[in-house]
Image (tube, rainbow, N blue to C red):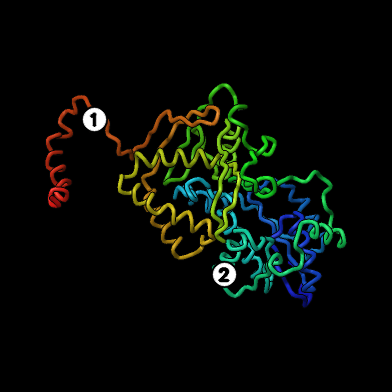
Amino acid sequence: MAENTGKTKIVLAYSGGLDTSVILKWLINTYNADVTAYCSDVGQKEDLNAVREKAFKTGAAEVVIEDLREEFALNYIFPALRGNALYEGIYLLGTSIARPLIAKRQIELASQTGAEYVAHGATGKGNDQVRFELAYAAVNPKIKVIAPWRIWDIASRTELIDYASKNGIAVPVTKEKPYSSDRNLFHISYEGGILEDLNNVPDESMFEITVSPANAPDKSEKVEISYENGNPVYLNGSKETPFNIIEKLNIIAGRNGIGRADVVETRITGMKSRGIYETPAGTLLQFTHRALEAITLTGEEIELKDSLLPKYSKLIYEGSWFSPEFSALQSMIDSTQKNVRGSIGIELYKGNIKILYRKSDKSLYSESIVTFEDDKGSYSQKDATGFINLKALRFKLRK
């Protein structure tokens, strides 16, 4: 840990990109601060040694990089998948799920180092400022927050680059992407730039982990995913860690053209925003989880879960992961998952998912009861008469 210099101590959520590198130097210059650059490895597949080196060159008093990939998968992605989280019916919440974990560890690090302040690089227009700061408040309500984009005089990317140049911060000489992107284990998101025009179709070169269905193999691929307590545990018969299951399914689904979404969503601030998402593993896991729930949960359980889905997903989207209401919903959801176990076999072909089989020792499906052939006395069709009469009574009483 950094030595006690008597300076203001700040822990910055740091990625190594232009924004947070400028913020790191700005915090040092503005507050005469010792800044700890904190970076979580949540599966973004970056050169974290280069991130560390750049932070020190930019003036960080300390750099802390943590491998949180397994924790992210087990304690954040898996709970959301158990809840079938889907914001506004289409977005699998990849960015939203990651922010609470990063913020929580940032606050814990601040406590360990005696820092009074935490800082982040989220803008005043987006969702992440809310997600970070609600998590900060939930973990340590006394922490002080610095949000540079809401208080400094820098108003554009050009001014950001000028500040970097004047302060000796390396700006990569590469062709600028006409959009911004954010990656973690669960997904990649793309927004801004050319994507702000709803008439612009994303160029195929933009996508990193999925191929176009048109370019997917001409031969289908079969996959089996097995669950215990609502969590995927086995892939094609092999037990895997949470991280490995998602990592491997990203590859499998991605090469078969599965997992893209072009979304116009309602931001927390109320404005509409367009995002392009790649979530290959998440797409497969939600599909198979729901298929398994269909045979292991009662209709009433499914109806209850689905009725809560918009609220549950909105709580995640809006940064309320650590709220008491989210905890209550998650506990209820998890209470339904003890019998969600078994295997789903699927076949992938050019962007499509086909179910091959469903297996569970907790299955509520009974072929002997549902059959249109001789049910051997396991179901009396005469019972339906009284049932229908009772269901129809309220209609008859209105006449």
Q: Quadrant of residue 242?
A: top right
Residue 114 seen: no
Q: Nearer the viewer, residue 142 or 159?
A: 159
Disc assigned to residue 137: 2
- Give amino acid for label 2: Ala
Residues at marks 1 and 2, CA–CA distance in whole angstroms: 55 Å
- Please state if 249 lies on the left or on the right of 309 as rendered: right
Foreground tag (1 vs 2): 2
Dot 1, crowdedness within 10 Å: few (<14), some or many (≥20)?
some
Disc assigned to residue 230: none
- Quadrant where the N terminus sits is bottom right
Residue drawn 52% across the image and 53% down it:
75
At which x and y percent is residue 261? 56, 41
Residue drawn 38% across the image and 34% down it:
359
Q: Nearer the viewer, residue 7 or 282?
A: 282
- Please state if 200 lies on the left or on the right of 354 as rendered: right
Q: Nearer the viewer, residue 183 or 260?
A: 260
Q: Secondary structure at mark 1?
A: helix
At which x and y percent is residue 216? 60, 27
In the rendered structure, which disc, 1 or 2, sits on the residue that comes first in sequence?
2
> Does 392 sit above or below residue 347?
below
Disc assigned to residue 368: 1
- Give amino acid for label 1: Ser
At which x and y percent is residue 38? 70, 60
Q: Residue furthest bottom?
A: 6
Dot 2, crowdedness within 10 Å: few (<14), some or many (≥20)?
some
> Does 123 sit above or below residue 249?
below
Q: Secondary structure at mark 2?
A: helix
> Does 120 sit above or below residue 32?
above
> Does 382 sit above or below residue 62?
above
Q: Quadrant of residue 380?
A: top left
